[in-house]
Image (cartoon, helix red, strand yellow):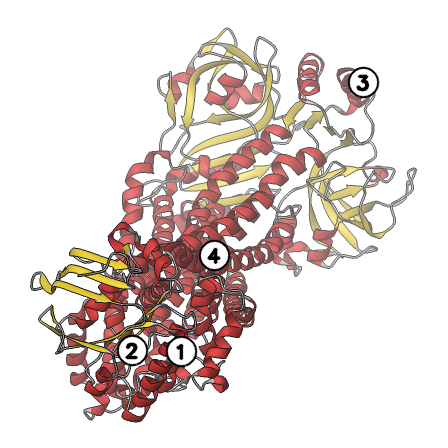
């Protein structure tokens, strides 16, 4: 049972379902997921490929509309918001890190980190961006474009971009999935350290048991359903 | 090779989705060239099929300033059936006193020998002309005369002092196209009526034409030779001009050729503009197939196999694009022809003409090769390592593809020049288009570079737009040159048209006379001046009225050499092939424009001196002091050139190409011409007053002539504007291609921006900034290039005053900017319409 007098949880999902169309007919990706993340909590979601982990992040972050159920970010029902409303809600409070990095290819590392800050209206965006690139060990790469950086470096830029706005909630979808072991360990260390420093709650999707073990709570997903705890 | 063919066939299983812009760019240019060529051939075939009607017979002989002698008429009669026609300009006058200049034409014999005169309100022409009523001959008149003089059929009116009755409305004459423009409505009557009106007494200039219909089966060349020999045998003097049905309207045929080529050239320019779309489509296709190419190489294929595979695919697609273009280009004139055939002023036979289609296909294939071959080099140079490192990209390298591309470009230029009616002008136009294209391309590179510099000064959404402009897929490098070329062509046409329209509607009415009077009797010059002064309410200043003696004659020798043996520049040839307007003047006139030499004293009485137009002097290398021999009033005069002067035929002044000193023609009975600047109210008063006291004087309203010229010009430019719009459309297609090529990247970018908290409006604004900047750049550069192309045409070719149509220019720049912005907004809307999650998953 949730305590109504407590501050709103960063993320709450109630009976969320997601059905997506496909060439072979509709596919039920999520089948009534209930899930809650407390402030500052770090939760790892594990499960086999295709069980709906990434779709859960897309729905939870407001990138995808659920077919049924309710998603609340910071107590706000996402179904009451349009696309722009959801973007404004995320702005400065929610960040995402992806397996494929998803940096803007025409922008330098510094510009990539500065862009969300500028969108949020921060005056010293570039200064902050440089400071965060320094924090992730890339002070010498600020003017490099994504294609001029290694995979590990790109993910560190993505981490700096995600955390520069000091979000209350960080979603990380297989953040080390495209990296070698050494880079993966470095990025994971950095991510947990910075998230703790910023005080962000974290929802981490991963196949890596070691990485999942570093989260405070671990939940298992199977065939679009959540089995909690593991 | 068969392996490459098999692999290419498999590639087609993916469909043509990525090649829509490729096909559209190619088909559009080919269709424009094919349509322009087909229309020109349809008109030429139309003229050829009605050559006898257009000439009015098989042979024609024209003489100026005299009629045919009985001996000459006997020569004609021996060849076949003959009709005679004479035409003069004279004043028509209604019983109400309203007057207007008309072209009075009298015909004799079985007119017309070929084709038929179309009348309404009367029976056949023979019946109409045979009717007489109380000494008044009958006439068929153009509806414009009935309208201007408020006449009805059956009413009497005067032409000069000759009474005529309007019996029928003249709709068309078969030989009108071979006769050119008329200054006033046409009045067709009998030869005898014109003769009895005193028009052929030599007092006013006239020309007579005999048209001959040969018996069936007669050989045209033999008959023409017999005609020449016969005229020589009877000692025919003077200058006669012989025409035949194979060259019925040479000027018109030349104009059709040149207009057709010009329209086709604009189509070619649209192929060049669309070339960037072709190039972009091929490059994007190869980029999308990078993994397939790398896989083929990893499986053991040599570099040539993937290149050949895509070469075959592109060749097949180019054939398809050309075929679509040919089908549209050949069908459009067929369909339009059916709709507008009746309204056409020139006969046309709309059909399938192979020659322009073959030409258009050759242009299409060469342009496809010129633009598509170079990017194909990427298929050869893509490394198999691209399988492992996706960021590895093939750079276009120098190789057989680049050489092939350069050869195709040279072939395209050569074909453009060789197929032109005037290769020198075509070479200049081609050089202009190539220079403009290279200039625009360099400008696009510079804009991308500048955007790179600006990105550090911008922030937020503005920087997203600026960064994309500076980035690898920048539309500044692809769409800007294509749109710029389209805008350049369109603006050149708009600027030429607006300058010339301004010339006839604003500048000419200010600088040129508003009225011209011809045929003022020599002994009543003073009385005429007084009449004008009275009608204008006071003696006019020399800036508002000028009268001068007038006669015509021709230059027959220069420095003792007959003109036939002289080397004359082509642009001055006209002055030595025909009669020129001449005058005699004592004192130096206002705005004489003397370039070389000195005007003779007012009371000069020595050997004949002449003032010559600078254009004519330059054309034959004549300098002050040289002797020219003139044939005027039936005699030869050797005159020393005293003055070379600039004659502005559009200005108010003594604009005669040749002026002699008064003593040179002392005693000759010279009629005068006069020019005046008058308000519309004064024009009416003058016309009415002259009707009473000077009915023989012709009054020409320059204002009306200018209005008609503006209308004709306006109609002519519709076709040219349409062709230029095709080039602009090609530019937009390239823009669409550039947008389509980056659609996937845009969707991903828009999704990331949304993830980072950007709203839809911010993303739309970013793309609007990017594409708006491309449109603005292309619009401004295009208009600047259009000005550079239009200025020499207006000032040097048409010798008109350059005036910049600011509203037209602004409209083009704004339209280019808005359309490009719209493209950006559509691109953003499409990208925003994609669901974010799948886009983020595909990497």
Residue B214 lies in quadrant: top left
Residue A171 lies in quadrant: bottom left
Mark nearer the N terminus (1 vs 2): 2
The verdict on a common chain for dots 4 and 1 is no
Q: Which residue is labeled 3 in the image? A: B530
Q: Residues within 10 Å of mark 1 (few under 14, many from 20)?
A: few
Chain of the residue displaying label 4: B
Q: Residues within 10 Å of mark 3 (few under 14, many from 20)?
A: some
Specify whether residue A104 is in view. no
Chain of the residue displaying label 3: B
**Residue placed most toward the observer, A115 or B313:** A115
Q: Which residue is labeled 2 in the image? A: A100
User: On screen, A187 above or below A65?
Assistant: below
Position of residue B272 measured from the top left corner of the image (x, y, whole percent): 42, 64
Position of residue B19 measured from the top left corner of the image (x, y, whole percent): 27, 66
The verdict on a common chain for dots 1 and 3 is no
**Residue placed most toward the observer, B110 or A211:** A211
Residue B183 lies in quadrant: top right
In three-dimensional space, the C-alpha distance between marks 4 and 3, rounded to whole angstroms, equals 66 Å
Q: Which residue is labeled 4 in the image? A: B772
Q: Which residue is labeled 1 in the image? A: A197
Mark 4 vs mark 3: give the one in front.
Answer: 4
Residue under the image location 8 percent in, 71 percent down? A223
Instruction: Tell me the SS state at disc 4.
Output: helix
Mark 1 vs mark 2: give the one in front.
Answer: 1
């Amino acid at each position: 049972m949730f305590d109504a007098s407590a501050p709103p949880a960063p993320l709450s999902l109630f009976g969320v379902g997601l059905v997506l169309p496909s060439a072979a007919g509709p596919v039920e990706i999520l089948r009534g997921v209930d899930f809650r993340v407390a402030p500052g909590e770090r939760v790892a979601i594990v499960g086999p490929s295709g069980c709906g982990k990434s779709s859960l992040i897309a729905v939870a972050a407001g990138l995808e509309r659920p077919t049924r159920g309710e998603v609340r970010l910071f107590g706000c029902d996402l179904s009451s918001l349009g696309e722009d409303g959801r973007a404004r809600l995320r702005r400065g409070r929610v960040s995402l890190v992806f397996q494929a990095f998803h940096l803007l290819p025409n922008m330098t590392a510094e510009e990539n980190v500065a862009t969300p800050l500028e969108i949020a209206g921060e005056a010293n965006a570039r200064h902050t961006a440089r400071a965060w690139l320094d924090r992730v060990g890339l002070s010498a790469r600020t003017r490099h474009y994504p294609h001029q950086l290694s995979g590990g470096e790109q993910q560190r830029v993505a981490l700096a971009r995600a955390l520069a706005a000091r979000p209350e909630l960080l979603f990380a979808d297989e953040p080390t999935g495209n990296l070698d072991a050494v880079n993966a360990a470095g990025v994971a260390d950095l991510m947990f350290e910075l998230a703790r420093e910023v005080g962000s709650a974290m929802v981490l999707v991963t196949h890596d048991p070691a990485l999942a073990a570093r989260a405070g709570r671990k939940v298992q997903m199977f065939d679009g359903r959540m089995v909690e705890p593991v | 090779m068969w392996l490459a063919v098999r692999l290419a066939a498999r590639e087609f299983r993916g469909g043509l989705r990525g090649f829509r812009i490729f096909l559209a760019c190619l088909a559009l240019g080919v269709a424009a060239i094919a349509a322009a060529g087909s229309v020109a051939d349809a008109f030429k075939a139309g003229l050829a099929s009605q050559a006898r009607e257009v000439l009015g017979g098989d042979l024609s002989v024209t003489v100026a300033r005299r009629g045919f002698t009985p001996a000459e008429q006997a020569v004609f009669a021996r060849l076949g059936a003959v009709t005679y026609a004479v035409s003069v300009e004279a004043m028509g006058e209604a019983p109400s006193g309203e007057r207007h200049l008309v072209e009075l034409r009298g015909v004799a014999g079985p007119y017309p020998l070929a084709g038929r005169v179309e009348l309404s309100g009367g029976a056949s022409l023979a019946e109409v002309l045979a009717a007489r009523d109380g000494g008044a001959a009958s006439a068929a008149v153009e509806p414009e005369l009935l309208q201007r003089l408020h006449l009805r059929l059956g009413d009497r009116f005067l032409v000069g002092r000759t009474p005529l009755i309007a019996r029928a409305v003249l709709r068309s004459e078969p030989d009108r196209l071979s006769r050119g423009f008329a200054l006033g409505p046409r009045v067709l009557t009998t030869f005898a009526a014109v003769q009895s009106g005193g028009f052929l007494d030599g007092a006013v200039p006239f020309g007579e034409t005999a048209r001959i219909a040969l018996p069936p089966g007669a050989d045209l060349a033999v008959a023409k030779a017999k005609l020449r020999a016969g005229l020589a045998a009877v000692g025919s003097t003077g200058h006669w001009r012989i025409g035949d049905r194979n060259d019925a309207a040479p000027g018109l045929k030349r104009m059709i050729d040149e207009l057709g080529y010009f329209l086709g050239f604009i189509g070619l320019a649209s192929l060049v503009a669309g070339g960037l779309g072709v190039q972009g489509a091929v490059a994007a296709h190869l980029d999308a197939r990078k993994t397939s190419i790398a896989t083929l190489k990893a499986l053991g294929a040599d570099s040539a196999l993937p290149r050949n595979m895509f070469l075959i695919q592109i060749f097949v697609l180019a054939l398809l694009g050309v075929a679509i273009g040919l089908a549209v280009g050949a069908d459009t004139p067929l369909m339009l022809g059916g709709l507008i055939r009746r309204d056409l002023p020139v006969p046309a036979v709309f059909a399938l003409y192979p020659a322009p289609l073959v030409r258009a296909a050759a242009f299409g294939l060469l342009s496809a090769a010129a633009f598509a071959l170079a990017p194909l080099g990427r298929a050869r140079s893509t490394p198999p390592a691209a399988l492992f490192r996706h960021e590895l990209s093939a750079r276009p390298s120098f190789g057989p593809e680049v050489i092939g591309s350069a050869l195709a470009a040279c072939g395209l230029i050569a074909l453009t020049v060789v197929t032109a009616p005037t290769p020198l002008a075509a070479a200049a136009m081609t050089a202009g288009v190539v220079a403009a294209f290279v200039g625009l391309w360099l400008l696009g590179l510079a804009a991308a570079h500048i955007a790179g510099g600006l990105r550090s000064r911008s922030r937020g959404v503005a920087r997203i737009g600026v960064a994309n402009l500076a980035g690898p897929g920048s539309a500044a490098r692809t769409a800007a040159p294509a749109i710029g070329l389209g805008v350049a062509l369109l603006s050149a046409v708009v600027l030429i048209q607006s300058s010339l329209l301004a010339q006839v509607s604003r500048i000419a009415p200010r600088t040129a006379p508003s009225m011209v009077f011809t045929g003022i009797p020599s002994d009543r010059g003073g009385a005429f001046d007084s009449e004008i002064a009275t009608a204008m309410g006071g003696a006019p200043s020399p800036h508002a009225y000028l009268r001068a003696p007038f006669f015509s004659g021709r230059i027959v020798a220069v420095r003792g050499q007959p003109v036939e043996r002289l080397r004359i520049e082509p642009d001055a040839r006209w002055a030595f092939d025909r009669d020129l307007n001449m005058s005699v003047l004592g004192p130096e006139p206002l705005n004489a424009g003397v370039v070389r030499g000195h005007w003779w004293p007012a009371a000069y009485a020595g050997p004949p001196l002449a003032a010559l137009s600078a254009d004519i002097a330059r054309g034959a290398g004549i300098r002050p002091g040289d002797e020219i021999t003139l044939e005027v009033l039936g005699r030869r005069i050797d005159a020393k050139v005293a003055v070379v002067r600039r004659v502005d035929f559009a200005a108010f002044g003594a604009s005669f190409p040749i002026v002699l000193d008064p003593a040179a023609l002392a005693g000759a009975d010279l009629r005068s011409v006069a020019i005046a600047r008058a308000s519309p109210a004064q024009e009416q008063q003058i016309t009415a007053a002259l009707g009473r006291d000077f009915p023989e004087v012709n009054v020409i309203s320059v204002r009306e002539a200018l209005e008609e010229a503006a209308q004709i010009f306006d109609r002519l430019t519709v076709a040219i504007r349409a062709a230029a719009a095709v080039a602009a459309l090609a530019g937009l297609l390239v823009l669409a291609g550039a947008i389509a090529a980056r659609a996937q990247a845009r969707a991903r970018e828009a999704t990331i921006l949304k993830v980072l908290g950007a709203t839809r409006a911010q993303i739309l604004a970013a793309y609007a900034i990017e594409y708006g900047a491309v449109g603005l750049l292309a619009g401004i550069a295009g208009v600047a290039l259009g000005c550079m192309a239009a200025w020499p045409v207006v000032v040097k070719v048409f010798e008109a005053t350059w005036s910049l149509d600011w509203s037209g220019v602004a409209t083009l720049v704004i339209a280019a900017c808005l359309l490009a912005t719209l493209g950006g907004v559509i691109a953003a809307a499409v990208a925003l319409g994609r669901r974010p999650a799948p886009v983020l998953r595909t990497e």
